Structures are given as structure tokens and as C-alpha cells.
């Protein structure tokens, strides 16, 4: 029987989408250890581009604002390490975490993470906290660049990575796949904001969201295709309003969509926080957009999602959990490439050649289901 720890420290560093896929792991950890003190340790991205993108989120320039989406009572405290280059920050984190005297360290890692990165994460935790038992690192498979043909799709959806610690603690049947439910909680203040926004802008008409941004250019579906989808939705649903969601960096794309019909297309890019966007998605009939945090956020709010997914990873691995069947992909010979920052071939055909009709088919199907 697993010894019950007084304090559990969880290491999880990731962006919005991956963090949402971690929520079931946090919920199940709390369920298994209801009396334990659970402390999340995370840090700002060391990638300058990603850090800049996070800074573009309204309401969360210096921290990971998505942490607040975890259901209340799931996490007791958060220790944010602002930079690995800051010795004072590392010393402060070390003093704080050792003072908690944790009995268990949970490494919430992603499916197929290379072993060298696992060792680095474990060594980092050891240096910060000391010789405390660590779980979650014995994931099956290791995705190495240049070894793509050896990747086994049976590794599963990324939601299983953060949950792997439970298999280490409680055996292979530690959880039922039917128990997995990424549920985000934006809070009552954000929900009040969303209700007021809807009252001010849509006057009770159906609301559909479009999220045309992406953290990297090779995950972008061309904006003219989003414009075609926008026009089709406005035509098919004459009383619908569309909200364009994203960061300040997506404002130029949003302007192109708003110009189609300024009376029915409104942008919240750079003005709505992640919590406010989540609350807005909760009241949308449908959300359409590039693979990324917004799609997982809307999925976690229980909304229908049509996600446009590039060929970076194998099918049914990173699609929004409740909306896997609504995801749209375009098959190309070079997929999956597992190149997370740029297209190795330079042509980005998995997105550039993805037709509007394929997306509209899923959009129209979802809208019919919502009637």
C-alpha cells in the first residue's frame, strides 16, 4: 500500500493547452490524497519566443495565467521559478521547497518525452529538494528527433502523460479512461464578465468563436481560409455573432475577420484574459481554430470544438479530448515530423493544403448537432 505523504510537490512546466490536459492528473492526485498539501512548481519558458507569446496574454504577463483554471481545492500553493538563470530565484525556491519537507515528488511529463530530458528534470528536482521519491518519469517510449518511424501511436493521447504517475503508484489499472475529464474553472468574476460582454455585444444571438492565432507560424492555417469559414458561418446562421479570440499578437488577423461584417464579428484579441476567454467559450455554440491552447480551453469548458491540427504529431494524440472526432487534419507524407518550432521541409503543406471544405464540413455538422 502506498504511504500517504503529508506534502506532495508537482513539477509541471508547459503552455496553456498542455496544462489543461494536466488538469485530470491534478484532480485525480487530489482524489487519491485528499489530506495532502499539494504544491505546484512551474517556471517561465526559457524559449524567448514562447515567453514573449505568454506575455501577450491579457492579464498574465509575468506568470502562467492558466494555473488559475484548476478547480478550487485541487492545488494548495504554487511556486513559480521565473528563470533558471536567476541564482537568487533558485536559492529562494530551494529554501521554500525543502522547508515543506515533501514526502513525494510527482513529475507530470508528456508522452514520449526523451530520456535525457527526463533525467534533467529529475536532477533538477533532486538539486532543489533533495533525495525524495520521484514518480511519473517511467513513461513508455521516447520520441527523439530523427527517430520518427519508430514512434508508436499506441503511446496514446497526451492526456495520459501527466497521469502516468498514478500507474507507478497504484499499478497499470490506476485509472479508468472514462474518468478523464479536463474541466477548467474560470471563476465567477470571469463568468460575470462574459455574461455582461454577451449582453452588450450579441443581444441574445448565438455566439461562435474563431481563434486564428498559433504559437508558431507552422501551426497557422492561412487567414484567408478563416475568412472563408467566417463568411460561411455568417451566411449559414443569419442571426449568429462571431467573437475572434486571441492575444495582442493576433489583432491584425482579427481585424481582417472583423472587416467582413463589423456588426456581427467582434474581436477580444489582447483585451480578454484567459479566464475571461474561458468563460466566453463556455457560452459559445462552437469554437473553431488552430491547434493550441484556445481549442483545449474551449474543450475543457464543455463547448463543441473544431480544431485544425498540423502534422507535427500522430493522429489522436493532441486533439482536444472531448472533440477528437471533430479535429481536421490534412495527410502529408512527411507527417508526423515532431518538429515543434518550424516545418522541416519548409512548405508547411499539412496546413497550407488543408481545404476550407474539410473544416466547413465539421463546422456545419457541429452546428446541426447544436440545434
Image (cartoon, rainbow, N blue to C red):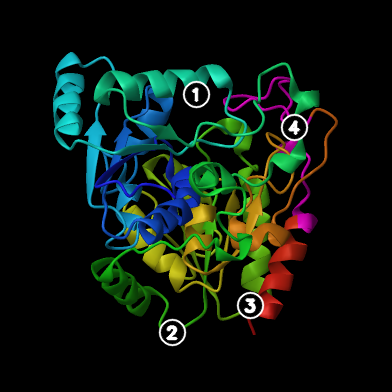
Comparing labels 1 and 2, the label whose residue is closer to the camera: 1
Rendering quarter of residue 257: bottom right
Report the span colored magenta.
335-358
Residue 124 position, x and y percent, is 35, 20
Give the distance between the C-alpha atoms of the residues marked 4 and 2, in whole angstroms.
Answer: 43 Å
Question: Is residue 298 covered in magenta?
Answer: no
Query: Closer to the N terminus: mark 4 or mark 2?
Result: 2
Q: Which residue is mark 4?
A: 336
Tag of residue 237: 3
From the viewer's side, name the closer residue of 311 and 234: 311
Give the distance between the C-alpha atoms of the residues marked 1 and 3, in whole angstroms.
Answer: 49 Å
Q: Which residue is mark 2?
A: 204
The correct choice, above or below, for 137 with respect to 4 in the image is above
Work out which quarter of the rendered image holds the C terminus and state it: bottom right
Query: Closer to the N terminus: mark 1 or mark 3?
Result: 1
Q: Residues within 10 Å of mark 2 (few under 14, many from 20)?
A: few
Query: Closer to the N terminus: mark 3 or mark 4?
Result: 3
- Check disc 3 and report its element: helix, strand or loop: loop
Side (left or right) of 77 relative to 341: left
Comparing labels 1 and 3, the label whose residue is closer to the camera: 1
Give the distance between the C-alpha atoms of the residues marked 3 and 2, in whole angstroms.
Answer: 14 Å
Amino acid at each position: 500500500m502506498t504511504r500517504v505523504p503529508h506534502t506532495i510537490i508537482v513539477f509541471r512546466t508547459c503552455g496553456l493547452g498542455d496544462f489543461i490536459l494536466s488538469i485530470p492528473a491534478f484532480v485525480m492526485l487530489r482524489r487519491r490524497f485528499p489530506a495532502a498539501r499539494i504544491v505546484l512548481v512551474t517556471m517561465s519558458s526559457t524559449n524567448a519566443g514562447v515567453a514573449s507569446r505568454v506575455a501577450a496574454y491579457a492579464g498574465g504577463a509575468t506568470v502562467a495565467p492558466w494555473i488559475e483554471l484548476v478547480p478550487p481545492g485541487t492545488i494548495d500553493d504554487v511556486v513559480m521559478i521565473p528563470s533558471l538563470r536567476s541564482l537568487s530565484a533558485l536559492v529562494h525556491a530551494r529554501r521554500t521547497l525543502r522547508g515543506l519537507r515533501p514526502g513525494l515528488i510527482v513529475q507530470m511529463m508528456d508522452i514520449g518525452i526523451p530520456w535525457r530530458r527526463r533525467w534533467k528534470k529529475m536532477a533538477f528536482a533532486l538539486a532543489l529538494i533533495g533525495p525524495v521519491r520521484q514518480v511519473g518519469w517511467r513513461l513508455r517510449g521516447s520520441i527523439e528527433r530523427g527517430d520518427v518511424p519508430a514512434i508508436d501511436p499506441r503511446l496514446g493521447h497526451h492526456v495520459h502523460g501527466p497521469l502516468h504517475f498514478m500507474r507507478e503508484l497504484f499499478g497499470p489499472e490506476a485509472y479508468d479512461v472514462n474518468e478523464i475529464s479536463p474541466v477548467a474553472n474560470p471563476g465567477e468574476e470571469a463568468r460575470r464578465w462574459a455574461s455582461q460582454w454577451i449582453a452588450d455585444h450579441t443581444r441574445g444571438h448565438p455566439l461562435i468563436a474563431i481563434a486564428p492565432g498559433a504559437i508558431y507560424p507552422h501551426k497557422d492555417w492561412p487567414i484567408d481560409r478563416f475568412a472563408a469559414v467566417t463568411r460561411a458561418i455568417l451566411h449559414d446562421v443569419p442571426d449568429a455573432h462571431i467573437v475572434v479570440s486571441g492575444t495582442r499578437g493576433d489583432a491584425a488577423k482579427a481585424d481582417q475577420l472583423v472587416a467582413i461584417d463589423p456588426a456581427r464579428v467582434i474581436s477580444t484579441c489582447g483585451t480578454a484574459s484567459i479566464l475571461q476567454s474561458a468563460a466566453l467559450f463556455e457560452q459559445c455554440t462552437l469554437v473553431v481554430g488552430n491547434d493550441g491552447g484556445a481549442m483545449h480551453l474551449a474543450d475543457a469548458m464543455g463547448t463543441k470544438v473544431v480544431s485544425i491540427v498540423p502534422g507535427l504529431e500522430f493522429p489522436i494524440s493532441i486533439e482536444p479530448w472531448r472533440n477528437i472526432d471533430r479535429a481536421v487534419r490534412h495527410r502529408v507524407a512527411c507527417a508526423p515530423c515532431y518538429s515543434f518550432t518550424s516545418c522541416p521541409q519548409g512548405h508547411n503543406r499539412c496546413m497550407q493544403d488543408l481545404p476550407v471544405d474539410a473544416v466547413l464540413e465539421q463546422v456545419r455538422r457541429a452546428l446541426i448537432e447544436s440545434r
